Structures are given as structure tokens and as C-alpha cells.
Image (cartoon, rainbow, N blue to C red):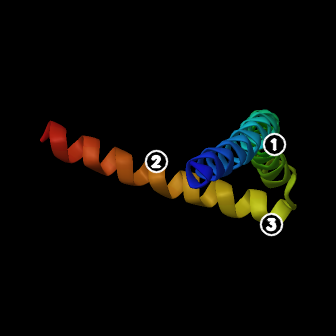
Amino acid sequence: MNNTLEAIHLLEVKLKELLSRYEFLKEENEILLQQNGKLQILLSEKEQQIDDQKKQFELLKVAKTMEGSNEDTRNTKLKINALIREIDKCITLLNS
């Protein structure tokens, strides 16, 4: 009978310990889920900032290209004229 009571008592102690661990892990999981949610929001905000910065960078590149020196402008005009001549040739060939 003594062994049975000791086994039951030991089982109760282990069960209480197990429940205590369960509650601790449950609380820890809730904290981690909250932190994860906050980090997901922060990540989303940072990704949006990166996208905005990329757009601004592209606009700056375009502005700098337009602002370029006279030599750059001259080269650009020459390239455009060459492309127009090629297009005219293609149109002529298509009409023939």
C-alpha cells in the first residue's frame, strides 16, 4: 500500500511540474508570437522604405542623365538621330 501511495504522490509531483512547464512555455510562446508580429510589421515597413529609396534613386539617375554635360547631350542627340535614320530606312523597305 505504501508503494502505491508513493507512486501516486510521485505522479502528482511530476504532473504538477509538467503543468508548470506547460504554462511557462505557453506564456513564452505568446510573447514570441507578439514579438514575431512586431518584427513582421517592422520588416514590412523597411521593405516599403527600400522600395521608396529605389524609386528615388531611379528618379535621381534620370535627372542626372538629363542634367548631363553638353557632350552627353550631343552624344544622345546623335544616337537619337541615328535611330531615326534606321527607322526611316525600315519604313522605306516596308513600303517597297
Residue under label 3, please give it: 71
Q: Marks 3 and 1, how far apart in space?
A: 39 Å
SS at badge 1:
helix
Mark 2–mark 3 distance (CA, rounded to whole Å)? 20 Å
The label shown at residue 46 is: 1
> Which residue: 79% across, 36% down?
27
Looking at numbered disc 1 in the image, what kind of residue is underneath it?
Lys
In terms of image quadrants, where is residue 20? Answer: top right
Q: Amino acid at mark 3?
A: Glu
Vertical side of 7 occupied by 48: above or below: above
Asked if the residue at tag 3 contacts the one at tag 2, i.e. Cβ–Cβ closer than 8 Å, the answer is no
Give the number of the mark in front: 3 or 1.
Answer: 1
The label shown at residue 84 is 2
For the C terminus, the quadrant is top left
At 82% from the left and 37% from the top, the residue drawn is 31
Q: Position of residue 47 (x, y in %)?
A: 74, 42
Q: Is residue 5 left or right of residue 17?
A: left
Of label 2 and label 1, which has the lower sequence position? Answer: 1
Q: CA distance from mark 2 to mark 1?
A: 44 Å
| Identity of the residue furthest to the left in this view | 96
Q: Is residue 13 left or right of 92 when viewed as pictured?
A: right
Say which element carries label 2.
helix
Q: Callout 2, which amino acid?
A: Ile
Check whether the beta carbons of the residues at disc 2 and disc 1 lie within 8 A of each other. Answer: no
Judge left or right: residue 87 versus residue 33: left
Q: Are marks 3 and 1 in contact (CB under 8 Å)?
A: no
